[in-house]
Structures are given as structure tokens and as C-alpha cells.
């Protein structure tokens, strides 16, 4: 996709499924090279293969965190780390973030920036990979009245299917990174190579965080929550037993996703 916009609604739940707080945000992603639909095609003039894409996020509500904004520049060279900038409204300052900042929980949630859409971590030459094919039982529809009841849910509260996957085991080989190992499920027959699941292990080898996406969204119908139609994510902290549910209203190939949305000046305008 050349231009993408996601209107997100985050819900934070404790280990018993009790809703703690919510917040809304808008996330945008725009490709600088490999463009197919919108001019300039196939690349922004003067880029010369340097920038692969840019991402931005702005918090819309509630009031206490409204205006928080972040810009991430992803370079095509795997040896060139991402550049990340953030506007912090409480101090009215722009800060350049380090790599460790993008692995901190976002605004108290269980989602970190490198786990967006299950995988946002930049590939690098230190990583090692193993792959195998399998068929796995996966959750395709979440039933039950509370989508945050992640750790208390029974098998009967969901619908399941056996689907074919590639399973990737990635060792980061970076002792300073939050994860030592990541296991990711890749859809084999979807045509889009979706990433519905990921297990992430800390540097002590413990299962730390898990991400779940059925490429559907949560809807309340006749008293029950369903995943249907679009995008929905669950981010679970397996150590703290805390869950963040995020559902998204995506606009694919959004013509309104302009280059101004990926400048600090443009983000400050959105934040206000």
C-alpha cells in the first residue's frame, strides 16, 4: 500500500478483564519507494533509495495525553537504524528517541511500536532465522461479552480453524534489545502473507509478550463481541497478565495521507 491511515481505539484491561482506560489515535504510513498507485511512482524524487517509508501517530483523546505525536523514518538500508522523533505536549518539546524507546509500552498500554501489526522491528544483519511449515489451530472469531477477558477466556468462547502457516523463529542476537527471540506465524494461503500471531521472549528466555491479529475488528452484536470485517489486535503481557485490545478503522490507499503528515511541523498542527 502506498498510503495508509488507521484510526485506532485502544482499550486497556487488567488480568481479570476489567477495563482500566481507553484512548484514540490516528496512525499513518506512507511509502517513499516501491509506490504503485499514487504519484510519484515508483519513488519520491530525490530519494534515491534512501527512505523506505515513514510512519506517524497522533493521540486524539483523552485530554491528558491528547497531542502526543511520534514520527518514525524507516531507511531501506538494514544497517541504518530508524530515526524516531516525538512531540511531548506536557513539556511542549520535541525529542529524538533512541532504539530502546520504541520498545517501551506506548502510553501505559501493552503495545510497543515494534509490535504494531505484530511486527514493526527493523530487520538487521545480526538476526538469524529458522522456518518450518505447519498447520495450526487458530482463533478466527472471538465470542464472549468482553474482548479484554484474554487470560480468563475458555476454548468455547471462540471459533477456531486449522490453517496452513510458515512459522518463523527469529533470534535478535542483541543483548540490549527487549526480546531475545520472536516466533511469528505467517499465513501461507491468504495471498497477503498476513502475520496473525507472534510470541516474544525476553532476554531471560521467558514468554514476555504476545500479539494476536485476525485481520478483523471487534463489533458488538446482540450483546456479544465479534471480530469481523477489518483489523483488530490483542497485545498481551504474559508476565504482568495485562491486556490491550486495539481495533482499527483502516483507510487503504488513502489520498488524504499527504507528505505533510510525516513532518514535525505537520504533526504539531495535527496535535493542536
Image (tube, rainbow, N blue to C red):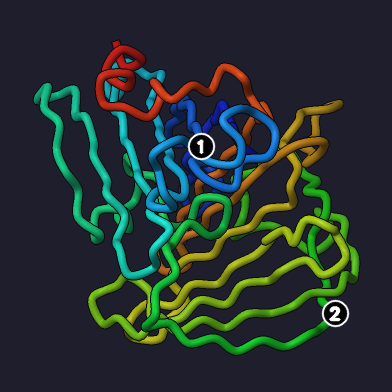
Name the image quarter holding the C terminus: top left
Task: Identify the residue at image location x=65%, y=64%.
Answer: 197
| Pointer 1 residue | 29
* Residue 95 percent location from the top left of the image: 14, 38
Residue identified by numbered label 2:
135
Task: Indicate the quadrant where residue 114 lies.
Answer: bottom left
The residue under the point 39% across, 74% down is 124
**Of label 2 and label 1, which has the lower sequence position?**
1
Residue depicted at 60% across the width and 41% down the height: 42
In the depicted structure, whether residue 14 falls above or below residue 247: below
Report x, y in % for residue 191.
84, 58
For the N terminus, the image quarter is: top right
Q: Is residue 256 above or below residue 173?
A: above
* C-alpha distance separating marks 2 and 1: 32 Å
Rendering coords of residue 46 (x, y %) = 39, 39
Could you tell me which secondary element the residue under label 2 belongs to?
Answer: strand
Nearer the observer: mark 2 or 1; the answer is 1
For label 2, the crowd category at 10 Å Cα-Cα, with few meaning under 14, some 14 to 19 and many 20 or more, is some
Q: Is residue 3 shown left or right of residue 61? A: right
Q: Is residue 112 visible?
A: no
Q: Horizontally, is 159 left or right of 125 in the view?
A: right
Give residue 271's mark: none
Quarter of the figure with residue 93: top left
Taking the image as drawn, is residue 251 in sight?
yes
What residue is at 37 percent from the left and 19 percent from the top?
62
Amino acid at each position: 500500500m502506498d498510503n495508509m491511515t488507521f484510526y485506532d481505539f485502544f482499550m486497556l484491561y487488567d488480568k481479570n478483564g476489567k477495563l482500566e482506560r481507553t484512548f484514540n489515535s490516528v496512525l499513518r504510513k506512507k511509502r517513499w519507494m516501491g509506490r504503485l498507485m499514487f504519484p510519484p511512482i515508483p519513488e519520491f524524487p530525490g530519494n534515491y533509495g534512501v527512505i523506505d517509508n515513514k510512519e506517524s501517530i497522533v493521540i486524539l483523546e483523552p485530554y491528558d495525553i491528547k497531542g502526543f505525536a511520534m514520527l518514525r523514518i524507516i531507511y531501506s538500508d538494514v544497517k541504518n537504524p530508524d530515526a524516531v522523533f516525538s512531540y511531548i505536549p506536557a513539556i511542549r518539546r520535541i525529542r529524538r528517541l533512541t532504539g530502546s524507546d520504541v520498545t517501551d509500552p506506548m502510553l501505559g498500554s501493552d503495545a510497543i511500536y515494534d509490535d504494531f501489526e505484530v511486527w514493526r522491528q527493523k530487520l538487521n544483519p545480526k538476526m538469524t532465522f529458522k522456518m518450518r511449515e505447519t498447520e495450526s489451530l487458530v482463533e478466527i472469531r472471538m465470542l464472549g461479552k468482553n474482548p479484554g477477558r484474554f487470560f480468563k477466556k475458555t476454548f468455547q468462547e471462540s471459533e477456531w480453524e486449522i490453517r496452513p502457516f510458515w512459522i518463523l523463529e527469529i533470534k535478535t542476537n542483541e543483548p540490549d534489545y527487549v526480546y531475545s527471540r520472536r516466533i511469528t506465524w505467517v499465513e501461507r494461503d491468504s495471498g497477503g502473507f498476513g502475520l496473525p500471531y507472534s510470541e516474544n521472549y525476553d532476554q531471560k528466555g521467558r514468554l514476555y509478550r504476545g500479539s494476536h491479529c485476525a485481520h478483523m475488528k471487534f463489533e458488538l452484536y446482540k450483546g456479544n463481541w465479534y471480530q469481523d470485517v477489518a483489523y483488530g489486535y490483542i497485545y498481551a503481557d504474559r508476565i504482568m497478565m495485562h491486556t490491550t485490545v486495539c481495533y482499527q478503522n483502516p483507510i487503504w490507499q488513502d489520498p488524504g495521507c499527504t507528505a505533510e503528515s510525516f513532518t514535525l511541523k505537520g504533526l504539531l498542527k495535527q496535535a493542536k
